[in-house]
Image (spheres, grey):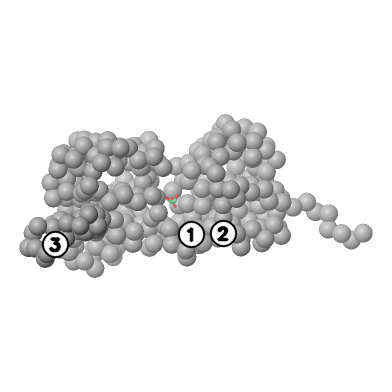
Amino acid sequence: TTQNTAKKPKIFIARAIFADALPQLEESFEVTSNQSDEVLTPEELQKALVGMDGALVSGGDRIDAKVLSAAKDLKIVANIAVGYNNLDIPAMTAAGVMGTNTPDVLTDTTADFGFALMMAAARRVTESEHWLRAGKWEKWALFNNPLGVDIHHSTLGIIGMGRIGQAIAKRGLGFGMKVIYCNRKRLPEALEQECGATHVSKEELLKTADHIILVLPYSAESHHTIGEKELSLMKPTATLTNIARGGIVNDLALAQALKAGKIFGAGLDVFEGEPKVIPELLACSNVVLAPHVGSSTEQTRRAMMNLAIKNLRAGLAGQRPPNLINT
Ligand code: DGY
């Protein structure tokens, strides 16, 4: 008769999570989960959220007014990602739903990958491998193999100087690079000094950087930050790396610039319309392509999941989640 009849909050897990996390969640919550990992359509997501108190989602799950319209009990949606352009925060706030993301835990891992893509594009790592596998390596040659451009002591241009941008700047310093950046807001001087980074206009950055890396959030304002006009300002020896979000770059304009040799190469982890990649990009040999894996190490993906769960638990316990986005 002393049985605890307090009802457990109901949560919906929209994507597969590391299996060992499930039993712990089931102790505290009534869990419904999409462990098949199939991406849900907006209609399926809307249905799945009916009667739920909380949800764990990831970048492919769009949470907007329509999806929320029947989710009358929902209090929190915890995103397993730092970028949250999939969450319509004003619509969530209007519906009384908290949104959270996973900053900090993926900063260095993602900065490492940005550097890896930039270096691979500059030194033509994947092209060299394809060349070798195609049986073209007959001898050591001074230049009759894919020649790259230097990274060390070149100028690194960072567009978007948040946590990941700053971590990339510090890596650049280790390579003896001159670091320039542009951002909506200039960093405080002490932070600029710590990153060894100089604030410049976007136009100056495009014209002078040898390697440009995009690390800004996606929004209506950042849509096509890099298009035909911007690409035409870049040096023909420069590379462009996008580890931020598809849509920040006009992919078709980039493919045309790569094909025409207007820039030297590119490294892309994100695409407009991903997981589809336009054939024009697939046809370019001077671009290194990755399937949105910037944060994809075992430790970091677990840390992202754990932080999202921490946010979810806090929100459902009536506390302020550590990474609340709504203001
Ligand atoms: C992020 O954390 O924003 C990554 O892009 C994964 O979605």
Q: Are marks 1 and 2 in contact (CB under 8 Å)?
A: yes
Depth check, front residue: 73 or 294:
294
Residue 77 in view here: no
Question: What is the three-letter code of the residue carrying label 2?
Answer: Phe
Residue drawn at (8%, 59%), measured in percent from left and top?
143
Residues packed near mark 1 inside 10 Å, few (<14), some (14 to 19) or many (20 plus): many
Mark 3 C-beta to ligand 1 under 8 Å: no
Q: Secondary structure at mark 1?
A: helix
Question: What is the three-letter code of the residue carrying label 1?
Answer: Arg
Question: What is the three-letter code of the residue carrying label 3?
Answer: Glu
* First-in-chain label (3 vs 1): 3
Residues packed near mark 2 inside 10 Å, few (<14), some (14 to 19) or many (20 plus): few
Q: Which residue is mark 1?
A: 301
Q: Is residue 151 left or right of residue 217?
A: left
Residue 25 in view here: yes
Q: Which residue is mark 3?
A: 138
Q: Which residue is mark 2?
A: 18
Q: Residue 69's spot in the image, x, y percent?
A: 62, 32
Q: Residue 270's spot in the image, x, y percent?
A: 36, 46
Q: Residue 165's spot in the image, x, y percent?
A: 32, 56
* First-in-chain label (2 vs 3): 2
Residues at marks 2 and 3, CA–CA distance in whole angstroms? 46 Å
Q: Is residue 218 left or right of residue 42?
A: left
Residue farthest toward the right in the current orientation of the protein: 1
- Tell me the mark number nearer the camera, choosing from 1 and 2: 2
